[in-house]
Amino acid sequence: LFIDLFCQFPVFTFLDTMSLKDKLIGDYDYKSLCLPAMMLPKGEQKFQFYEKDEALPIFLSIIMGLQHALAMVGGLITPPLVIARFNIDITDTDLQQYFISAALITSGICTIISVMQIPLFSFKGRQLFIGSGVLSVFGTSFTFLPIFETAIGQLADDGTDRLDAYGDVLGTAMLCGLLEVFLSVLPASILKKLFPPLVSGISVTLIGASLVGTGMKYWGGGVVCADFFGNCFGNGEVILPYGSSQYIGLGFVVLSTLVVIEMVGSTFMKNCNIIIALLFGYLIAGVTDWKGDTYVDNDAITDAEPITFLWVKTVNLGFYGPAVFPLLIAYLVTTVETVGDLGATYEASELDTNSEDFSSSIQGGLLADSVCSILAGLFTSMPNTTFSQNNGVISMTKCASRRAGYACGGWLILLGILSKISGLITSIPDCVLGGMTIFLFSNVFVSGLKIIGSADLDSRRVRFIVALSMACGLGVTVWPFAFADRRGQPYTANFWQCDDCNDDMKGVRNGVSIFLSTGYCVGTVLAILLNLILPEDPIIVRKSDVKELESEEGSAKEEEVAVSVDKASDATA
């Protein structure tokens, strides 16, 4: 009821036109939602379709919102946990818990803004909005993770405190987020021309490829120990070398659980498969040990405060010039992703993508990307953009009602406030987290392949653009040290050694290094340039086609002559 009132919906009309049962639970097929498919008679799984603005029963709103929240929690918590644990301070569990809570609360607030679609003012006769006005949720973006990691490392090598370095990159990301304000007022047709599916597919694929390697490091025991092949310290009391079978086995439990859920799980379980698999892997880690040492750090849960909120911890916002260009590329990529995500949301919601409403949703969604990324920085969290995996929840449950989006935002805020949940997440061993993240990151990779598949791969031009962009992007992703410094060895990359450079030149050098060592930045820029400068493939015409075309043209001319004669006769008469 609070959600209805807050979002200015006609709550009293909603109550007056529905029976008590309809108000509370409705006639939704909860059995098909919750029971495994093997337990349902064939052909009995039937879901009522709920349209964008259709009223939902209270219980169904809560269930659908929880389902969307659980579907995105695994991906949402990963970037802040990675930054806090592996790039700032692996021993500061309080900071890690706060970063997770802040990310959850921020994503909840941004999801409500997106679903609400707040009207602003008219610009050149066009009404502008903040928010898409459809069931499109927001979360912490993976796109910015590689840039944050590289930039924080560079600042730390120059002697900056790592938390202050995070604040510098965060402030820079807030400033660069203004780019999407400009892009949001461009017509959707121009955006699609500048960033066709071919370009967006290459970008998303390269983002997934860069992240999968990071997921593998977690699975083997942790990021730092993977880089040095030393002992790993992020798995409770168990300290073993990177790649130990004990770590690999616990990560494999998560992947095996995902397979089982896909085989026999209910619709609800499949929509929440990532968080369920993660929690089951966590359970196995909790009940096992290695020579008396436990994998789970229970102190992280017991020491966590009962509740928390934004700004319990703060960071000093600053500016880091070398990160500007890579961050602008990242915002271009998120622009492409948002256009694609909203198109998928419209299709899953059975809405018309050629309508004026779709153009308004694109404009409002892009502006929400910008506003929410800036808000996220003020909330001490990384940039927030649309989450695409929730479109699968809409497709499977047939619920496109925005009420589910408001409930999802409410659940995320609640999960963030209850800091014991953040304590539980930070106590998850790195190897278990790796089993989840490697699947999650590979999903990003597969999404990119799907987008590329929508292009004409029989075209020589398209294949050339994909091949050259992927060659450079994947090459840099697999081996970034042609341009990047190794850990703990600043300014030593042979591409541009800069030990004795002044501060200004070091800044320029670091900016170039971030760009050239971030695979999706290189690949995206190449794809955009090649798409603009390469000519279209020549049209292949066969002799039979020419004869057929000449025959059709001759028939058309005869028809034109006949029509002209008829008109002349009529005029004479």
Image (tube, helix red, strand yellow):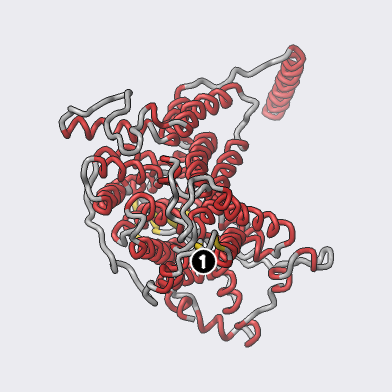
Instruction: Return the residue found at the far front.
Output: 291
Q: Residue at x 41, y 52 (%)?
A: 82
Give above or below for 39 relative to 74.
below
Is residue 329 at all visible to an observer of this figure?
A: yes
* The quarter of the displayed image where residue 467 is located: top right
Q: Residue at x 74, y 21 (%)?
A: 552
On the picture, is 248 further left or further right than 524? Answer: right
Give above or below for 389 relative to 463.
below
Tell me where residue 478 appears, x and y as whole percent.
Answer: 48, 33
Tell me where residue 282 appears, x and y as whole percent.
Answer: 55, 63
Helix, strand or loop status at disc 1: helix
Instruction: Return the residue found at the far left.
Output: 502
Closest to the observer, 150 or 198:
150
Q: Which residue is mark 1?
A: 405
Q: Residue at x 32, y 27 (%)?
A: 493
Closest to the observer, 186 or 87:
87
Tell me where residue 517 appears, x and y as whole percent.
Answer: 39, 33
Closest to the observer, 276 or 28:
276
On the picture, is 268 further left or further right than 126? Answer: right
Quarter in which the C terminus is drawn: top right
Q: Residue at x 54, y 56 (%)?
A: 432
* The quarter of the displayed image where residue 117 is located: bottom left
Tell me where residue 144 appears, x and y as whole percent.
Answer: 39, 46
Badge 1 density bin: few <14, some 14–19, many ≥20, Cα 10 Å: many
Closest to the observer, 481 or 331:
481
On the picture, is 339 further left or further right than 453? Answer: left
Q: How many marks can you see?
A: 1
On the picture, is 343 further left or further right than 93? Answer: right
Amino acid, disc 1: Gly
